[in-house]
Image (cartoon, rainbow, N blue to C red):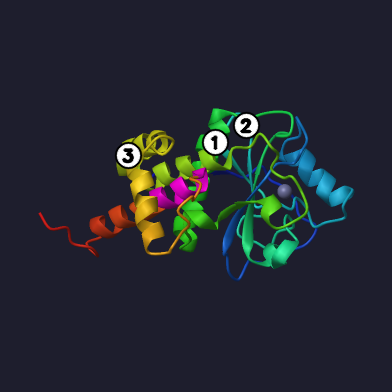
Amino acid sequence: MIKMQIENVGLKFSKALTPLKRVTKIIIHHPAHPTWGIKKIHNYHQKSNGWNGIGYSYFIPKHGGVQLGRGGNLGAHCKGMGMNNQSLGICFQGDFDKQVPTEAQYRDGAKLVAQLLRQEGLQINDVAPHRDFDATACPGKNFNMNKLKQYILEEMNPNVKGVVQTMSEQVKVSIATQNAIDHLASYGIIQKDYKVTKDFEITLISMMNGLVNAIENGKLKVKQ
Ligand SMILES: [Zn+2]
């Protein structure tokens, strides 16, 4: 995996930042403003909110790339469930109740998140939208979390790229998936009328990624 270049735009914080002790989640945001860039947001958080500076850890501009906010320091982006103390906040430029993220944002955002997950020893299910923790619609109804997660998985394991795509098409119609559900239902693990959602598919892909990684790292032997 190629290490993502992180641009430091030289934001000045009012006082020294405090490094996070632990990171358990990567939280996805939008600033809900159609054009504001990292400097405008920094200024707003500092002057209007009276904060130390921009609350987000990293910023993904519309044209792609990654810009440094608070980085691995204590942020101000997600109050719910004490998340500020234990998460990184990735903000994608735009208002995704009205706009859609660019392909460059999804790709570069995925590269950054894949890198952070690896660095922090986290899993794909540790990536969550802000709305999971606070009473907010953030990152907006047009932000496709499943698309971002698929891109992250592809970044984490390029070898399954084709498989990920094949699976995402299969799940809609797949008899194999239905068989798997029937099988699980026969053990009472899930209901027989279990509705296949995109999340279920993401879980399958995530499990497969885990297996491929275990095989590649020699932790799991495959009988030839
Ligand atoms: Zn948010």
Dot 3 crowding, Cα within 10 Å, few <14, some 14–19, many 20+:
some
Given residues 74 and 85, the one toward you in this image is 85
In this orientation, does residue 17 appear?
no
Percent of width and height locating residue 38: 71, 40
Look at the numbered discs 1 and 3 and tell me whether their residues touch, using CB distance below 8 Å. no
Q: Which residue is mark 3?
A: 163
The residue where tag 1 is placed is 106
Residue 101: give its label: 2
Task: Tell me the distance, in whole angstroms, between the alpha carbons under discs 1 and 2.
Answer: 7 Å
Residue 13, magenta (yes or no)? no
Dominant secondary structure, magenta: helix
The verdict on label 3 being within 8 Å of ligand 1 is no
The amino acid beneath tag 2 is Pro
Query: Which residue of the protein is positioned furthest toward the bottom in this rendering?
Result: 21
**Image coords of residue 88 (percent x, y):** 62, 57
Is residue 195 rendered to the left or right of residue 159?
A: right
